[in-house]
Amino acid sequence: MGYVAIKGGEDAIAQSIRLVEYYRVRGRTAPVSIGQIQGQFRLLLDKIMGEASLYAPEHAALVLKQNEGDVFESAFMLRAYRATLQRRYTAETLVTREMFIRRRLSSAFREIPGGQILGPTRDYSQRLLDGRLATETLGHIEDFLAQFEAAAPGRPTVPVTTLPKVIDLLQAQGLLREVDDDASRRVVDVTREAVKFPAPRSAALQMLARAETGGLMALAYSAQRGFGSTHATVGELRVGEVPVRVRDARGRIRVVGRIRLTEAEMISRLRVQRRDESPALSLGYGLCFGQNETKAIAMGILDRAMRSGGDAPCQSQEFVLYHTEGIESYGFTNHLKLPHYVTFQSSLSNLRQAIERKDRKRGQLGFGAAVVNTTSSPS
Amino acid sequence: MQANQPDNDRVLCECDLASLQALVESLETRHQIIVTRPPGVCLTMIRAEDSLERQEFFLGEALTSECDVTVDGAVGHGLCLGDEPVRAYCIAVCDALLHTGRDQPAEVNTFLETHRSQLAAEEQREFNHILRSQVDFKLMEQD
């Protein structure tokens, strides 16, 4: 397909940008600070960082403010910002077993080593509107925090510790087995190397980790509903902070801080390939920036579905990975708003010619339905 | 000191910035500090691996600040997550002083100890709150 550039319109474009700003501020409400956004829109920023594939909470807050809450545009802009920066370090492989746990659960086992920890979640709430927030003041916040901090621990203090993985239980019993497929184990960076299908699993996991949450959820849901062969159970879901280590210029391993992550280990049955093979379970893996449980679970389901073989959409690597890439799909959908005058005129011209040919074949006069066919109606 | 470096790094990355800045400002009066790489932002690619097959993959990048200095001729590298030019500079200064091979300034060690304790106490407080949401769901047929 060819494209023809447009020109002109600079003044209108400049004014449209001023209008964006005008509609953002015309209510003359107090400006929202970056600190407020970081403090009170934690989950939204986590989503933006995950889809932008850039862990930068302050910048995520800034773009969210700039884009009036548009998550797609914010992730797009953050990715564009990322492209202006030099990658100078590659971190050592994260060890999620070191996670400072804020939330950790298993829906497969009731009793797990270290226990089920609900942490911050709305899962068990009644989803009722809280009208008090409409008139919330800093005083209310201080009161809540004072009461929260003052509440006596319900049990003796346990020293801060890391927790073992739930899958260790299954591994110890020999019930978990690796998926035996032909996928390459080569570690690919999709930001540096064009993806070809079938893609190595590393590329698939990277693309899922930076995919759009809603897209992942839709396809993972399709897998659960029967369009695919996997029905997964949450072996373990954990949310918390993990240290990031890099090697500095002198070759020393340095801790540069901690990042918040969500990890989901999704257990499902492994299809037996040979008659002599005993049945087993396998794992779909989900890991993403921030607290984004929907994304990590969906990623785990799709990781497993794409390796299960079959004709369902969720089992096709190309279908899943290309269509859940949020920035690409957002960009393509929105580019349809840009002038397509020449391409459309070209289509229209082809259409007119086709109609003319058809009409000519029928012995009619051609394009223009208003012309009365004088040959077929006797006067 | 080398053995404690990751621990020291973590304290310097997570401690209160104003206190760290005050420490470094006091050090500036007694040491010759030359900034060899001004504070700037760059990217760190984060590597991860799945739990069962240990398949490595790239999770995404993290905004990182870095700065290099020399303190009385000793090289220091400052690295931390985020857009934190001041912190990266302060970490670089502390890094140089902690790894000169000479006597380490007592105030840096005192600072690290104090803030290590503070961070540990804060983490313990948070952990206590989190553990209060530990749950033992009963099945319906159980009491």
Image: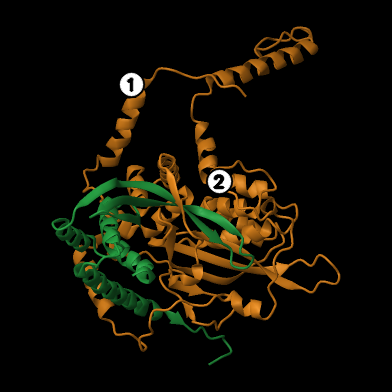
What label sits on residue A11 in the rendered view?
A: 1
Residue plotted at (56% across, 85% down): B139
What label sits on residue A352 in the rendered view?
A: none
Q: In this orientation, does residue A144 appear?
A: no
Tell me: A264 left or right of B3. right
Looking at the figure, which quarter contains the N terminus of chain A? top right
Identify residue for label 2. A325
Chain designation of label 1: A
Q: In this orientation, does residue A3 appear?
A: yes
Pinpoint residue B90: horizontal percent, then vertical percent.
25, 57
Pinpoint residue B104: horizontal percent, then vertical percent.
24, 67
Residue A378, quarter of the rendered image = top right
Residue plotted at (33% across, 52% down): A58
Q: Which chain is orange?
A: A
**Helix, strand or loop at mark 1:** helix
Circles 1 and 2: CB atoms closer than 8 Å: no
Pinpoint residue B89: horizontal percent, then vertical percent.
27, 53
**Helix, strand or loop at mark 2:** loop
